[in-house]
Image (tube, helix red, strand yellow):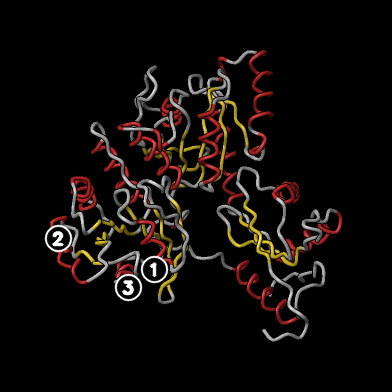
Amino acid sequence: MTDESVPELDGTWSDEAEWAEYDEVDAAEDAAPPAPQPVLAVVGRPNVGKSTLVNRLLGRREAVVQDTPGVTRDRVAYDALWNGRRFTVVDTGGWEPDAKGLQASVAAQAELAMHTADAVLLVVDARVGATATEEAVAKVLRRSKRPVLVAANKVDDERGVVDVHALWSLGLGEPMPVSGLHGRGSGDLLDKVLEVLPESPRERFGAGGGPRRVALVGKPNVGKSSLLNRLTGEERAVVHDVAGTTVDPVDSLVELDGEVWRFVDTAGLRKRVKTASGTEYYASLRTRSAIDAAEVAIVLIDASEPLSEQDLRVITMVVEAGRALVIAYNKWDLVDGDRRRQLEKEIDRELVRVRWAERVNVSAKTGRAVAKLAPTLRTALDSWDTRIPTGRLNGWLSELVAAYPPPVRGGKQPKILFATQAQTRPPTFVLFTTGFLEAGYRRFLERKLRETFGFVGSPVRISVRVRERRPKGARR
């Protein structure tokens, strides 16, 4: 049990035993955050049946499936459970290599999987066999230190098993015949997945007291490489007036304010990943990978120019990835009084949803205020790691709901029964309610959470679980 009493918000919980059950569960969560789960990345060409197979592995329909190739555009993560073990399945978009960028596109997807997953599942259409695309990615995966499994999909009956043997040529071990559509061989595949997955992720944030990981991201030519060189005190990254000099992320250990940080300078994002091609496609995927592998991101914005769609898209990418955020306005030496006033208006108009992110006005050229980055990074990471005790959270929520009840929906007013912080990194809260809460009310709750508990520099997620009220005395 928590050391604070848990107040009853509205008296509608079914019975004292159920209150006790949730109190004990959340007390355990307060004492020890949920352990991170190992990650399996599912990769392959378009229309080989990745999403269908993912649904089969999950045991439920989660991934969107359609006959048209390329339905899955972005990587989507799902929680999976098999034989008592939990792990995360990441469904990736299929490769669409073009004549110019085949090797770049294939290598980007393969490296993306290798860098962010603990094991890789390569899905191949057994009826088509290994194409040039699969042979290219197999070459990259063979150099990986991650375990790799090959799923020969669309083997719907015994006649298809003979086609599987040809996939030995990929050099990735024994191909496993499966049918995502009918479930054939899925149990054996899951058993094999558990064999190769570690008990916990290979890399854990903050494990072993290692340097905190910082992704330096932004659109091209905002001065990311110049800032990295200023921080390291050497020409670690190539700098040029031509936008797009950096393609691969560049790792650097940087000492700031007496602490060592691992900075990653990434390529600038011009376009959406799904519309980029060739080297640009490769750079975009590597940038997304760097954000996923980081704990906090510094989004660098050119303060001398108006905020652009690319700036907003990079910020959105960081928030959706659930990473802590610091916004640095670079080239401040070029900002005069008029531009400063205009910038404030742009920030109030365009960045209203990320007012919680700390801002630092810097100049990579002159070194202005770069020393302020370390304190803001620490503040953002502290917020990212913050956990609110269950009793304190429910006491605060009880008072707030009494003063500002949820709006009526469908003639009924939903009630918030109970709340818990399900996890940190980022702080994620689950509300148990008797009805759906409007998006506007959830934003109101987030704003009040920040006013009371801070969370400066960290995204906050609020999830609602609607529970039906059981009659008192009913069997559980």
Where does residue 359 sit, x and y in percent of width and height?
62, 32
Examine the image and state in which quarter residue 375 appears.
top right
Quarter of the image with the C terminus is bottom right
Q: CA distance from mark 2 to mark 1?
A: 28 Å
Which residue lies under the disc numbered 3? 191
Query: Which mark sits nearer the N-terminus, 3 or 2?
Result: 2
- How many numbered discs, if any? 3
Residue 272 in percent (x, y) is at: 44, 34
Residue type at numbered disc 1? Glu
Q: Secondary structure at mark 1?
A: loop
**Mark 2, secondary structure of its residue:** helix
Q: Secondary structure at mark 3?
A: helix
Q: How many other residues sit within 10 Å of disc 2, few (<14), some (14-19) or many (≥20)?
A: few
Query: In screen coordinates, is 182 left or right of 382?
Result: left
| Left or right: residue 347 compared with residue 131 | right
203 up-or-down from 349: above or below: below
In front of the other: 376 or 310: 310
Q: Nearer the viewer, mark 1 or mark 3?
A: 3
Front of the two marks 2 and 1: 2
- Reading the image, the residue beneath label 2 is 168
* Residue underneath mark 1: 199
Q: Nearer the viewer, residue 438 or 246?
A: 438
Q: Quadrant of the N terminus?
A: bottom right
